[in-house]
Amino acid sequence: MPNSKLVYTTSGSNLCSICGRALHKCKCESEARPIDTNIARTPQIQLEKKGRGGKEVTVISHLGLSGAQLLELLQLIKKKLGTGGTLKNQSLEIQGNRVAEVRELLVSQGILKSVN
């Protein structure tokens, strides 16, 4: 952002590295880079409480998806679980302790392999 007088922003890294637009408005990353489904991914689902005023947040990271795919997955999770959530630093944050529900949803979508 040359000649920008921006002092503070809450957008974090939700900007496209190619065009600089917000990830939910960007289409270049999803068109330019098709995702290889054969890549071995090990998504992590964690419950975090520290630094959030005692509130619990389920964090899903290391998904190996593009920005547009992460936003689509976030919308799906929020709709299915009826809860709030956001995308921060290429990881999804879902409000509340939803580890079991998120794990089941990721298995049903084929993103996570089931562990019996």
Image (spheres, grey):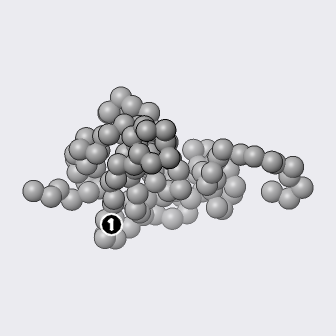
In the image, residue 59 lies at what x, y percent?
Answer: 40, 50
Residue 108, compared with residue 53, is above or below; it is: below
Residue 110 placement: quadrant: bottom left
What residue is drawn where x is 81% and y is 48%? Answer: 6
48 displayed left or right of 10: left
Residue located 15% across and 58% down the image: 115
Q: Residue furthest top?
A: 82
Q: Which residue lies furthest to the bottom in this view?
A: 39
Q: Which of 23/55 is in front? A: 55
Q: Is residue 64 left or right of residue 1?
A: left
Q: In this view, does 38 lie above or below 15?
A: below
Does the rendering let one see residue 26? Answer: no
- Which residue occupies the foreground of this view, 97 or 86? 97
Q: Is residue 50 at least partly visible in the picture?
A: yes
Viewer-proximal residue among 59 and 30: 59
Structural crowding at the residue carrying mark 1, measured as other residues with C-alpha within 10 Å and reported as few (<14), some (14–19) or many (≥20): some
Residue 41: where, in percent of width, then height?
Answer: 33, 66
Q: How many labels does the image show?
A: 1
Quarter occupied by the C terminus: bottom left
Report whether 23 appears left or right of 49: right
Rendering quarter of residue 63: bottom left
Looking at the rendered structure, the secondary structure element under dot 1 is loop
- Residue 3 image point, x, y percent: 90, 55
Residue position marked by numbered label 1 in the rendering? 41
- Across and down, in percent, residue 78 comes to 39, 35
What kind of residue is marked 1?
Arg
Residue at 32% across, 33% down: 81
Q: Residue at x 53, y 50 (%)?
A: 88
